[in-house]
Amino acid sequence: LAKTTQPISMDSYEGQEVNITCSHNNIATNDYITWYQQFPSQGPRFIIQGYKTKVTNEVASLFIPADRKSSTLSLPRVSLSDTAVYYCLVGNSGYSTLTFGKGTMLLVSP
Amino acid sequence: ETGVTQTPRHLVMGMTNKKSLKCEQHLGHNAMYWYKQSAKKPLELMFVYSLEERVENNSVPSRFSPECPNSSHLFLHLHTLQPEDSALYLCASSQDQDGGTEAFFGQGTRLTVV
């Protein structure tokens, strides 16, 4: 399983762009990179997934450099409701794809 | 609403009790998962089922017994639990286990063992 490393916590203010970087130095050729968001006492929710370059959807962007050894989740103009734990997962099959690490606790303040 | 429903939402049980957690999905997914999340700890993957066959058993104690009677339902049978088993138990499902899969999680069952 590709090991991931994320910052334990990050602080931001409403309206700012937040970038959370995840390191995955031993990512395999066929591994995908997936990000989830989790609020307290709720199940995680899928945010975005990518394999290489850049992916964008209605809530976030995912930047993946050419070597794929890291990835950056970008949240534009965060609000208080974006306060949550964000997980970066790397894998190519259900078991490895859905093994969670410690995640990054994002706190958005007014 | 994610399409994955867990019942009950809250459960208090004694160490000698037997109870079951239920998970149901009607998303047409072929893979289902049980996770445990203790306070201030990462999610721990407990069991993986694919097409109703158990794929992974992540060294979970035998007091936790999963059952997958069909692709839409998943149970976690509990017996002689310990207080340290108190946690949020989450069920998830995904289309399959191939790369690029997106998992959908239920709201979880908050279990307290007394």
Image (cartoon, grey):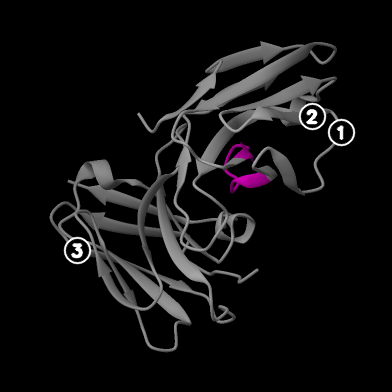
Q: Amino acid at mark 3?
A: Glu
Residue A77 circle label: none
Q: Amino acid at mark 2?
A: Ser
Residue B24 magenta: no
> Residue A36: x percent and y percent?
41, 52
- Taking the spot 59% from the left edge, 37% from the top edge, the residue there is B39
**Where is residue A41 drawn, in percent x and y?**
47, 31
Q: Secondary structure at mark 3?
A: loop
What mark, if any, has residue A17 been given in the picture?
3
Residue B50 against residue B18 in the figure, above or below:
below
Report if residue B114 is visible in the image: no
Q: Residue at x 19, y 47 (%)?
A: A79
Is residue B27 found left or right of B71 in the rendered image?
left
Pointer 2 chain? B
Report which residue position mark 2 lands on.
B65
Find residue B24 and report its horizontal and vertical position in percent. 53, 25
Chain ID at mark 3: A
Residue B46, relative to residue B14: is it above or below?
A: below
**Left or right side of B13 for A78:** left
Is residue A57 something that shows in the picture? Answer: yes
From this view, report whether residue B50 is shown above or below residue A2.
Answer: above
Q: Which residue is mark 1?
A: B62
Query: Does label 3 lie on the same chain as label 2?
Result: no
Give neighbour class at mark 3: few <14, some 14-19, many 20+ (Cα, 10 Å): few
Real-space Cα separation, disc 3 to disc 1, in angstroms: 46 Å
Q: Which residues are magenta?
A: B33-45
SS label for mark 2: strand
Mark 1 residue type: Ser
